[in-house]
Image: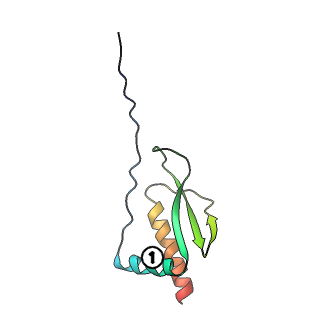
Amino acid sequence: MVVNTVLMIKTVNWKPPPWSKEYRKIYSWCLKHGIKIYPVATSKGEKNKNCYIEVSVNGKTTLSPKHYGVSELWPKIFELYKFYYDKRTN
């Protein structure tokens, strides 16, 4: 008797960021001024539920000490973009 088994890999549903007009303005300004902030997976594979945040300012990169889950990742990234925008434009 042969039994077929199918592996059910549970993937994580990473939602896209909430792009408001204000965030697009801040994001564009940061990119033009060499500031890039992006997620870095904590482990390989589709089951990964956490990411670190890496900040690159004019080529110098820093990795966050804390990892962030699905619901807190994009709000934190936008918080950091806004921090750099406010710091450099005020």
Q: Which residue is mark 1?
A: 27
Q: Which one is in front, 53 or 61? A: 61
Mark 1 nearby-residue class (10 Å; few <14, some 14–19, many ≥20): many
Quadrant assignment for the C terminus: bottom right
Number of residue marks: 1
Question: In the rendering, at what x and y percent does residue 74 appear?
Answer: 45, 64
Q: How is the image coloured?
A: rainbow
Instruction: Tell me what residue is drawn at x 49 percent, y 67 percent.
Output: 77
Give the image quarter of residue 16: bottom left
| Left or right position of 18 against 80 | left
Q: Amino acid at mark 1?
A: Tyr
Question: In the rendering, at what x and y percent does residue 37 appear?
Answer: 52, 68
Question: In the rendering, at what x and y percent does residue 1 appear?
Answer: 35, 9
The kind of secondary structure element at disc 1 is helix
Instruction: Tell me what residue is drawn at x 59 percent, y 58 percent.
Output: 66
Instruction: Tell me what residue is drawn at x 55 percent, y 75 percent.
Output: 35
